[in-house]
Image (cartoon, grey):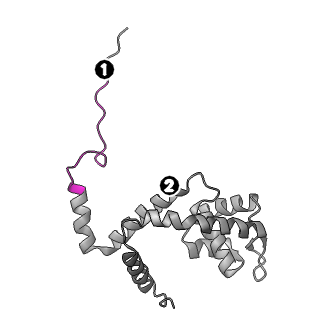
Amino acid sequence: MATAPRPARLASPSRADDSGERRRYFAALTLDRPDVALCRATTAIARSIDERLSGGPLTVPQHLVLKMLAAVGSCSQQELSEQLRIDRSVMVGCVDALEGAGLVRRERHPRDRRAYAVTLTPEGTAALAGAERAMAPVLDHAFAALTPQERATLVRLTRKLLDVPPAD
């Protein structure tokens, strides 16, 4: 028994060839809405970094958690989530994986018995050192469209938007 040919699948409008309309639209939008431009740039940079780190020992959120713990000491998962802008549900899995690998440990929070503090272990310190060494080429790739001077300007302007004092 012969089957009827299936109708052609409709292409998603977002995947259809638009002859550059979307590109022109977003180029114009960046002039009017720098907030949208920053969000789109952040997404593109994050994707580039995620691709380069895929299959590595740490995910981007895990690396950021280790980095913050090394810099400021033990923190609650809630504080890590808020400060690093990582969704709480993602943070739970992130800390679970780090704890399972022996890179962090959960301890009762010294000032809040209901909460746990996440603490970096010596193994976590070693893993962070390796991740930090691997990050420079990843960032160089992600920001390859910028000259070193443009990258320094981006850092300076971003710090200004975030009300972070200038670096010494």
Q: At which x and y percent is residue 83?
A: 57, 76
Q: At which x and y percent is residue 105?
A: 77, 67
Count of numbered marks: 2
Does residue 3 sit above or below 27 in this rendering?
above
**In the rendered image, which quarter contains the N terminus?**
top left
Say left or right for 102 vs 35: right
Check if mark 2's residue and mark 1's residue have beta carbons within 8 Å: no
Q: Which amino acid does label 1 sit on?
A: Pro
**Secondary structure mostly seen in the magenta stretch:** loop
Residue at screen point 47% across, 90% down: 166
Q: Distance between the residues labelled 2 and 1?
A: 38 Å
Q: At which x and y percent is residue 165?
A: 49, 91
* Mark number displayed over residue 5: 1
Say left or right for 65 vs 13: right
**Which residue is more in the foreground, 59 or 76?**
59
Residue at screen point 43% across, 79% down: 155
The image quarter in which residue 145 lies = bottom left
- Please give the residue where the numbered disc 2 appears in the rendered image: 51
Q: Is mark 2 on a helix, strand or loop?
A: helix
Q: Please report the bounds of the magenta region as a residue range.
A: 6-22
